[in-house]
Structure formats: structure tokens, C-alpha cells
Amino acid sequence: NPEAIGEWQQSLTLLRKLVDTRAVPESFWIDFAAIAQDAHDHNLGAQLRPAMDTILRAYITKNGNYRSAELLHSAYIALNPTEPDAAVAWIFSLVDAARYPSTILNQLAPDEGGWFPRKSLGLLYRRQLDLAQRADAQQSSQSDSASASSDLTQARARLLTYLVQQRQDADAQSLLET
């Protein structure tokens, strides 16, 4: 129904304006989740994705990891299950809007109480490792390289544990050799 899509678009436009205020009201997360659920229920996630993307990028850029995990979960619900791979790729691109994307990725992981889909955990752990490797390379010349190395070790351990649990022995062996 084009009229209903227009109303959802208008609601998303209002939510985007709220992001620019000093602090969004508590209803912001509730309203975004409701719109995302409606998008899922009516198979409109792909149509509403551009407007949701605008809101989420602005919010994550401004607020970092503060309550971003729940917004990302709502975004994932909007696209899933019709496009689970696209939803995961979108989540990763949104996380990149943060100053410290690894902090948000860590919140998504199940071992941190996150919601990330089990079948895509390998992608999450690889993404965490990639970010940790980049941070380690950037900080290797700085005095805080111990922290980056610790993050890198933890990311490698998470991915290695996952690969072993999934019986992906060749990938686990390859990771050990790097």
C-alpha cells in the first residue's frame, strides 16, 4: 500500500530529525523498533532501508555504541529473513559509521549478550579480527600497542574457537599459521 509506505517514510523522517537533537527521547528506540518490525511483517524492509540507513548512520556517528546494538537488531529484523546475508552486510556497513566500530561489534556477539545470528557468527568474528589487525598495525608505532595486541589476541581466539567448534579445521589451521 503506497499510502502506508508514505506514512512509514514520514515517521522515519521524524526519527531522523530527533537524532540531531541533544538527546533522543526514550520513544526513539521503541518507535524505530516498531517501524522495523512493521517493515519485516509487510516485507517492506528493502523499500524502507534507505531511510532507516540515514537514521542509523547519523545516530551511530553521533552516539557511537550507546544503545546502537538494539537499533542494529531492529534494522536486521526489517530485512530478515528475506535477505539475511544482505542484512548482515548492511549491519557491518552501519557499524563502520562509528568512531570505534569494534566496540559495537563486540556488543553484537553472543558471548557479550548480543543478538547476532548464529549462522553468521563466522562473519562477525572475521570482521572483529580484521578491525583488530588494522588497529594493531596503526598502533604498533605508538605507546598503546599493548592494548591493540590484546584486542588482536582476543579476536583471534574468538575466531579460532568458533572455527574449531564448527569443525572448520582447515580454516582454524590457516588462522594458527598466520
Image (cartoon, rainbow, N blue to C red):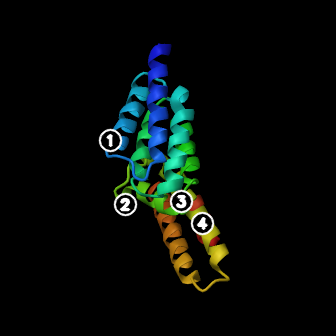
Work out whether mark 4 precedes mark 2 in sequence or the reverse, and give the earlier one.
2
Q: Distance between the residues labelled 4 and 3?
A: 22 Å
Rendered location of residue 111, percent (x, y): 37, 60
The residue lying toward the viewer, choosing from 18 and 70, is: 18
Q: Which of marks 4 and 1 is in front?
A: 1
Work out whether mark 2 precedes mark 3 in sequence or the reverse, and give the earlier one.
3
Which quadrant is the C terminus positioned in?
Answer: bottom right
The residue lying toward the viewer, choosing from 170 and 70, is: 70
Disc 3 residue crowd, few under 14, some 14–19, many 20+, Cα 10 Å: many
Amino acid type at image mark 3: Pro
Name the element at disc 1: helix
Disc 1 residue crowd, few under 14, some 14–19, many 20+, Cα 10 Å: few
Residue denoted by label 1: 27
In the displayed structure, 16 sits above or below 154; it is above
Residue denoted by label 2: 112
Residue at image point 44% right, 27% down: 39
Give yes or no for contact between labels 4 and 1 (Cβ–Cβ under 8 Å). Answer: no
The circle on residue 101 is 3
